[in-house]
Amino acid sequence: MSQRNENKNKMAVTILTGFLGSGKTTLLQRLILKVKDSGQKVAIIMNEFGSFDVDSKLLGDDVSTQSLLNGCICCSLKDDIEVVLHNLYHKENPDLVLIEATGIAHPVEVVDACQNPTLIDKVEMPSIIGVMDGKRYLERTRYTKQTKHLMEEQMLYSHIVVINKSDALSANEREELEQSLLSFKHPPKLHFTNYSNIDGIEIPVNEVLSIEGKHSHHHGIQSMNYTFSGPIDMQLLIQFLRQLPDSILRIKGFLKFDEEPEQTYLFQYAFGVPQYEPEIMNMPLTIVIIGEELDKAHLRNKLDMLNFS
């Protein structure tokens, strides 16, 4: 784990990048434990594209966590992250700041936001950890040209690439991924794993990568929130999910079901696969939907039918 540069007294910063649903939050939780076990002080900045923050609620109360909502820190929230980093430097003085970017953020633009002239004497050049679902990355041609390009660029600028769900990869698929990633101008260190396990990873600090050229941003992706008034029927939810178009990239939030009305679940949906995890806290029953060119009125109408059935 990295050490603070005592001469410059700068904060080390690590950015977690990767497309929607790749496992960044699980990796973040593991990195927090790793930093705390090493005796260092850590602070977290989490950027949610929507206006409802899910992930920071999962990290506990003993870690300094700042949430940046309703935009991307690589464009519309650049000024916000500058303010947050200034406040962290003067009030918290952490050894390491971990930034979980949105799944649609370009890592170079996040680096740029952290290297504002007013921060240059306070923040080290960030290191970047890319997180991917190996199978999904290999199938990236099924998405739009813009999405495919973003997925590639998120890995292109990473110091380390964590390849999740590696047990689902065949030997040929693993070799294909290795050849693709190691062909980059600045090849990243590769870490094949499952469930974002990071045993053996060391975070690089202040490594300067070539970040020249023009970088795309996925302006076609939108988000919307929906809050349920109470428990819902799970079978009706499954029917709703089956009818969703491929343009719906991610759903995340908290739900209760009629069959077990007192139990709150963390609900996640990505590329046709729903996941439910019991949640011990009684969270607001709000979900965030992220996708390309959302038909918000249609989705809200369908969710109303689900909510009030």
Image (cartoon, rainbow, N blue to C red):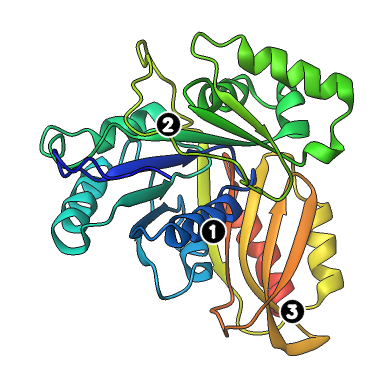
Q: For the residues carrying marks 3 and 1, which lies nearer the camera in this image?
A: 1
Element carrying mark 1: helix
The quarter holding residue 265 reads bottom right
Q: Residue 132: image x %, image y %?
A: 64, 36
> Which quadrant, please, contains the N terminus?
top left
Crowd tier of the residue under label 1, counting other residues whose Cα lies within 10 Å: few below 14, some 14–19, many 20 or above: some
Crowd tier of the residue under label 2, counting other residues whose Cα lies within 10 Å: few below 14, some 14–19, many 20 or above: many
As drawn, the residue found furthest toward the bottom would be 262
The residue that label 1 is drawn on is 29
The residue shown at (79%, 67%) is 237
Nearest to N terminus: mark 2 or mark 3: 2
The residue shown at (84%, 53%) is 242
Say whether marks 3 and 1 touch (CB < 8 Å): no
Nearest to N terminus: mark 3 or mark 1: 1
Q: Residue 96: image x %, image y %?
A: 33, 50
Q: For the residues carrying marks 2 and 1, which lies nearer the camera in this image?
A: 1
- The numbered dot on residue 282 is none
Q: For the residues carrying marks 2 and 3, which lies nearer the camera in this image?
A: 2
- The numbered dot on residue 232 is 3
Nearest to N terminus: mark 2 or mark 1: 1
The residue shown at (78%, 37%) is 166
Residue 41 drawn above or below residue 107: below
Crowd tier of the residue under label 3, counting other residues whose Cα lies within 10 Å: few below 14, some 14–19, many 20 or above: many
Disc 2 residue type?
Pro
Q: CA distance from mark 3 to mark 1?
A: 29 Å
- The numbered dot on residue 107 is 2
> Is residue 51 among the parts visible in the rendering?
no
Disc 3 residue type?
Ile
Q: CA distance from mark 2 to mark 3?
A: 38 Å
Disc 1 residue type?
Gln
